[in-house]
Amino acid sequence: MPKDEQETHRLDFQHFGLKLLLGGNYKAPIDPARTHSILDVGCGTGRWMAEMVQEFPQAHIYGIDTDAPAPHIQFSARCHFSQNDILQGLPYADHTFHYVHQRLLVGGIPTYYWPATLQELVRVTQSGGWIELLETGNVYHNAGPTTKQLQAWWDEGMTTRGFDLSIMPTIDVLLTRHGVINVHMEKIQVPLGTWAGRPGELLGLDLFEVFKSLKAVYTEKLGIQPELFDHMVALLPKEWESHRTTYEMYSVFGQKP
């Protein structure tokens, strides 16, 4: 999605919600004193980079995205950007980075591209370095009828177009198949709504805005009537509150031998 002002704000509160939920910006066992080169694939606004450069005083952090970073964020001279598409490969040499990070790109990487994408992440990582991913799938808990219907429409329509979110619970297996060792994966239940405090408030608002932004996909590609889509999406926040809905995310990291 283009980073207009509204989308930039959404990505910011998504970042802060995830940081609260995860307890920080990363989970891999990386040492700030020994980590000198970091890559953020799909860096979005650049907010994660701007914070990580403060946590890693020795590191240069490189970000790649199809769009430019947000103009309102101030970046250190140790932050470097490349406007490229991961689907075209990474513009870096083999064994370049101590740590490679990728977050929430399942909606932008077709299923058949995932093996090549993971191979690129492994390729640019140094021996002994770490690769970390955070992705979402299509598993909801305590979902109400509106959530179930919107998800069913998405799964039925987008799977035929090459996007299958159901592969995400096995992303640790995919990493292992690419030779990554010491792989650790955690299923994280993401709360949606103020019933779960500040993280739930931020992440519920984030997902609500994501659904609204997908109107063209639902109406033009999946054939859902615009009025029906608007009605369904408007019901989501109240439904998430009453059902205490969560959805699953998958945090996985591993080490290159």
Image (cartoon, rainbow, N blue to C red):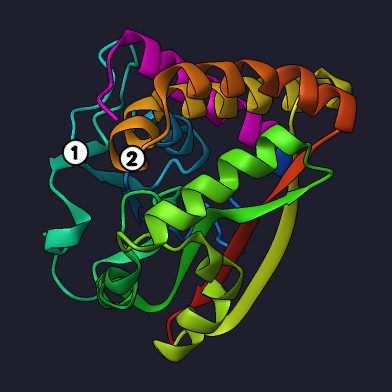
Among the 4 quarters of the image, the one containing residue 194: top right
Q: Which segment did they paint magenta? A: 1-20
Q: Which mark is residue 65?
A: none
What is the distance, in whole Å, between disc 1 and disc 2 at their CAs? 9 Å
The residue closer to the viewer here, 202 or 73, is 202
Question: How busy is the neighbourhood of tag 1: few (under 14 within 10 Å), some, or many (20 plus)?
Answer: some
**Residue occupying image coordinates x 47% and y 32%:** 54
* Magenta region, main secondary structure: helix
In the displayed structure image, the side of residue 127 where residue 246 appears, left or right: right
Q: What element carries label 1?
A: strand
The C terminus appears in which quarter of the rendering?
A: bottom left
Q: Where is residue 59 in the image (x, y as percent from the top left)?
A: 36, 48
Q: Which amino acid does the dot numbered 2 rest on?
A: Cys
Q: Position of residue 252 (x, y in %)?
A: 59, 66
Q: Can residue 39 be seen in this view?
A: yes
Give the residue at x 71% y 19%. Answer: 237
Instruction: Report x, y in % for residue 213.
Output: 40, 24
Q: How crowded is mark 2: few (under 14 residues within 10 Å), some or many (20 or more)?
A: many
- Rendered residue at 32%/28% (across/down): 216
Residue, disc 1: 81
Say what amino acid the circle numbered 1 marks.
Answer: Phe
**Looking at the image, can residue 12 be seen?**
no
